Structures are given as structure tokens and as C-alpha cells.
Amino acid sequence: GQNIDQPTEMTATEGAIVQINCTYQTSGFNGLFWYQQHAGEAPTFLSYNVLDGLEEKGRFSSFLSRSKGYSYLLLKELQMKDSASYLCAVKGYSTLTFGKGTMLLVSP
Amino acid sequence: DTAVSQTPKYLVTQMGNDKSIKCEQNLGHDTMYWYKQDSKKFLKIMFSYNNKELIINETVPNRFSPKSPDKAHLNLHINSLELGDSAVYFCASSQDAGELFFGEGSRLTVL
């Protein structure tokens, strides 16, 4: 089975940098995804890591360490619109299992 | 064009009723899913179909029955609705086990 752990809530200020951590224990690993979900909307894809290291995409970066069962999502130059839930999801043998999400609140 | 569309978006019904949610994807993906997101926002897999064949059936009551008439459609029928079934149900699709594309969600409220 899969066990995915991420903080429940985080707060940050507009313009700042925030790092959202995710740790996982899994019986099979075929990649780690990060999704963003605004209130009342569907999750949308942010990033995918299958090999160790950092993937950068604009203001968002995601890091993976398979040996440590650890990933983080780094958000730079925070904007008010980044207030959302961020979901860490691990792909096992056949399915994608989501963590409970981290609610990020960005304040002015 | 909407990539993954599901209907209805909102559903309010009484306990004991039977209801269906429909999902269609126009992305040409081979795999479709149903996820349930409860009031605590936990997104949990229910079913997965690959080319009309059921490949994942998590611990879901028998009252839930998915049907895939073709690889572009995956419907969810729920019998004898219970209060605990109230949630947002998301349909999703993917190709070659890649990223998921989600529909807008169907918010089910059981009274």
C-alpha cells in the first residue's frame, strides 16, 4: 500500500518563497506528481518527477529523493492566486494515490 | 472543447434513491478513473478502467457500479444512496499511466 504525508496547512506572504514537503512509503514507485486544486475546482497537474533531482517549471519547482521517500514543491514569487490546496500523489504499480493535501494561504 | 466532462455538476437527492453520473473524455486516452473527494478534501481512487476493462476496484461498496460502454466514456451508478455518499466525485483520464486530467467534479448531496 501507499502512505503519503504532507502538512495540512501553510501560510506565506505575497512575493515570498514556500516549500511544501511530502514524504511517502510505497510498495511500488513509478513517479511522483504534484497537483494544485483551487476551492471548488478540479485538481490540475503541476509537475512530475520519476528520477532524483529538481524539475523546474517557471515559478514552480519539484524535487525528488527516491532513497529518502521525499519530495518537495517549491513556489517562488508567491501570488495571491497561489492560495490553493497542493496535492502530492505517488504512482504505484497501477494507480495514483493522493496525499491529503496542503492548504496554502497567501496573504498580502 | 472540454477535455474531460462529467454530468451533472450538482446532484441533490434523498437517501435510498439511485443516481448516475456520466463522464466523457475527448483526449483519446486509454484509461479512465473515478475518484471520490470527501468533506476533508481527501481524494481517493474508486475505480479505474483501461480500454473498457476494469483494472482497479478499491474497497467500494457494491452499491457503486461503474460502466464503460467505450474507452471514451465511464459512468458511475450508485444504488440506495446513503448520507456518507455525499462528496465530490471526479472523473479523470490518462494515457499510458501518465498525468491525470480531471473533470470538473460532480457534487453529490444526500439528504
Image: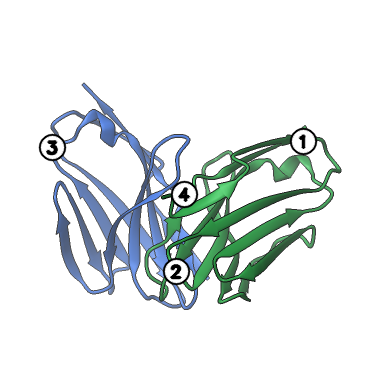
Say what secondary structure mark 2 lies in: loop
Work out how far the residue at label 4 is from the one at label 1, CA to CA, in angstroms: 27 Å
Q: Nearer the viewer, residue B99 or B57?
A: B99
- Taking the image as shown, residue A79 lies to the left or right of residue B43, namely left
Identify which amino acid the numbered label 2 is placed on.
Gly
Spot occupied by residue A62 in the image (x, y as percentages of width and height)? 22, 57
| Residue at left offset 47%, top offset 78% | A93
- Kindly check if marks 2 and 3 are in contact, taking CB atoms under 8 A apart as contact: no
Cα distance, mark 4 to mark 2? 29 Å
Residue drawn 48% across the image and 35% down it: A40
Q: Can residue A104 be seen in this view?
A: no
| Residue at which label 4 appears | A100
Q: Colour of chain B?
A: green
Crowd around label 2: few <14 · some 14–19 · many ≥20 (10 Å): few
Q: Quadrant of residue A50?
A: bottom left
**In blue, which chain?**
A
Find disc 1 in the rendering and name its residue: B13
Position of B64 relative to B106 (above/below): below
Whichever of labels 1 and 2 marks the residue nearer the N terminus, that label is 1
Q: Nearer the viewer, mark 4 or mark 2?
A: 2
Q: Do labels 4 and 1 share a chain?
A: no
Q: What element does badge 1 sit on?
A: strand
Q: Considering only vertical position in the picture, is B61 above or below A41?
A: below
In what quadrant of the picture does the C terminus of chain A appear? Answer: top left
**Image disc number at residue A77:** 3
